């Protein structure tokens, strides 16, 4: 692994550094886990399938073939860019060997090594994001646990965290549903994050998030523990069909509340849909039109039912319980401790940082990457309590 540019130093000779570089940045000559040749062969096979007569007769199959090809091409193209950059680095080493005392060469090589290291990590993530809906937009639902205002304020902090993460990524985001708390925070919120592989990146955020802090609502300044649940589902496109029987639905209308302009509370435009067989509930109030809110709520319901079923299948494969966990102590996936010390720790991957402020400001990528590289399921990591 390449060192950071601020600390990297060349070894005794440029030639020895040059020969060691492939090990440092992942060896562009071997392909490793990326298997570019295998992926090119599969792309060629998919192209032959697409050229066959009657390919478009089965629209679902045709779309699945196109989607698989696009995912493979994304990895191969990324690998080719990485390999080309690796060759450019080799040229830099040649210059450095000719002028070993020139500090500019050392700085340029160090910067390039760090950049290649980042690209290699991104490329590795790209090979992992190959699930059926990984490339889709993400619907992020946030609900506070027990604890009233404390938990509602924590849920609001999580909503801001995911909004800031989306902005850092250059992803668009939109509030589909927002129910403010009575004193502070939120009773619930649903955020749509629009961007390439948004669901693939955020799917590991599903679970219970725990906060320990000195309460701003406690005049005695005591420490409080709060919980909030996050559930991430993919915004479904036409390639994935989820059949819902209308007789299984209860549809309620209510007056919208929350940010929405001067007309937001004038009509019963908000929609709440309950899927009776599963007890799944979604609501939408971001539009003034009841018809538009109903259409959006149905999309949210399909997405949530799809993700619930996908997770149930995964849990069955892992011989784990598919029961929904209570929002309480012991079931959390991540702890955020603000007092008596500062630490964010993922209990599945053990990734941690003391920079809590940065994480709450949207710096989630290290946790997301750790989860994906860990296998995307947290297996083998025991849940553990972070002492308060």
Image: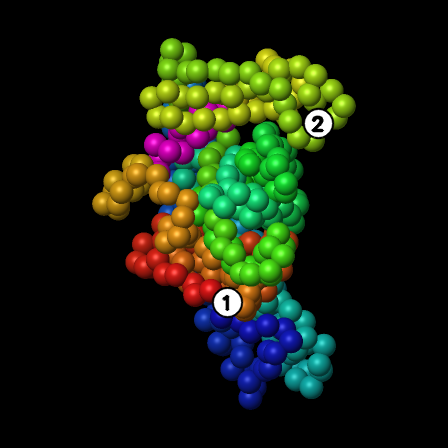
* Disc nearer the start of the sequence (1/2): 1
Say which of 346 and 336 sits in front.
Answer: 336
- Residue 230's label in the rendered image is none
Q: Residue furthest left?
A: 319
Q: Is residue 233 left or right of residue 253?
A: left
- Residue beneath disc 1: 25
Start and end of the magenta stretch? 299-311
Q: Residue furthest top?
A: 247
Say which of 136 and 358 sits in front.
Answer: 358
Q: Residue furthest front?
A: 220
- Neighbour tally class for label 2: few under 14, some 14-19, many 20 plus, Cα within 10 Å: some
Is residue 244 among the parts visible in the rendering? yes
Q: Is residue 55 above or below residue 43?
A: above
Alpha carbons under labels 1 and 2: distance apart: 50 Å
Residue found 59% across the figure and 82% down from its top: 10
- Residue beneath disc 2: 260
Is disc 1 in contact with disc 2, using a CB cutoff of under 8 Å? no
Q: x%, y% of residue 387?
A: 43, 65
Label 2 sits on a secondary structure element that is loop
Instruction: Assess whether residue 304 is covered by the magenta stretch.
Output: yes
Say which of 184 and 300 sits in front.
Answer: 184
Q: x%, y% of residue 315?
A: 29, 42
Q: x%, y% of residue 67?
A: 46, 33
Q: x%, y% of residue 37?
A: 40, 50
Quadrant assignment, res 253:
top right
Q: Is residue 71 above or below residue 355?
A: above
Residue found 59% across the figure and 32% down from its top: 179
């Amino acid at each position: 692994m390449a060192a950071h540019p601020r600390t990297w130093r060349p070894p005794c000779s440029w030639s020895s550094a040059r020969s060691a570089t492939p090990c440092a940045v992942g060896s562009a000559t071997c392909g490793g886990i990326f298997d570019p040749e295998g992926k090119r062969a599969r792309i060629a096979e998919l192209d032959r399938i697409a050229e066959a007569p009657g390919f478009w007769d089965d629209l679902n199959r045709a779309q699945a073939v196109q989607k698989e090809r696009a995912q493979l091409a994304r990895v191969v193209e990324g690998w080719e860019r990485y390999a080309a950059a690796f060759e450019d680095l080799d040229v830099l080493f040649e210059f450095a060997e000719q002028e070993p005392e020139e500090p500019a060469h050392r700085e340029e090589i160090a910067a390039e090594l760090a950049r290649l290291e980042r690209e290699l990590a991104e490329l590795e993530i790209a090979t992992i994001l190959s699930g059926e809906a990984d490339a889709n937009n993400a619907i992020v639902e946030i609900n506070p646990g027990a604890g009233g205002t404390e938990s509602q304020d924590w849920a609001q902090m999580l909503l801001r965290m995911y909004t800031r993460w989306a902005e850092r990524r250059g992803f668009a985001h939109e509030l589909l549903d927002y129910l403010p708390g009575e004193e502070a925070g939120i009773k619930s919120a649903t955020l749509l994050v629009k961007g390439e592989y948004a669901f693939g990146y955020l799917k590991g955020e599903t679970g219970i998030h725990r906060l320990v802090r000195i309460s701003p609502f406690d005049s005695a300044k005591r420490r409080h523990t709060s919980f909030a649940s996050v559930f991430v589902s993919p915004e479904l496109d036409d390639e994935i069909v989820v059949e819902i029987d209308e007789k299984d639905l209860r549809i309620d209308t209510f007056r919208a509340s929350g940010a929405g302009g001067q007309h937001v509370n004038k009509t019963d435009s908000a929609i709440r849909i309950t899927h009776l067989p599963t007890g799944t509930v979604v609501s939408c109030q971001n539009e003034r039109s009841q018809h538009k809110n109903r259409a959006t709520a149905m999309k949210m319901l399909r997405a949530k039912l799809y993700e619930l079923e996908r997770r149930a299948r995964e849990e069955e494969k892992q011989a784990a319980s598919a029961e929904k966990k209570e929002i309480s102590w012991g079931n959390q996936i991540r702890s955020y401790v603000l007092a008596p010390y500062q630490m964010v720790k993922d209990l599945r991957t053990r990734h941690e940082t003391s920079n809590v402020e940065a994480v709450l400001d949207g710096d989630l990528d290290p946790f997301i990457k750790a989860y994906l590289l860990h296998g995307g399921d947290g297996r083998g990591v025991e849940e553990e309590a972070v002492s308060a």
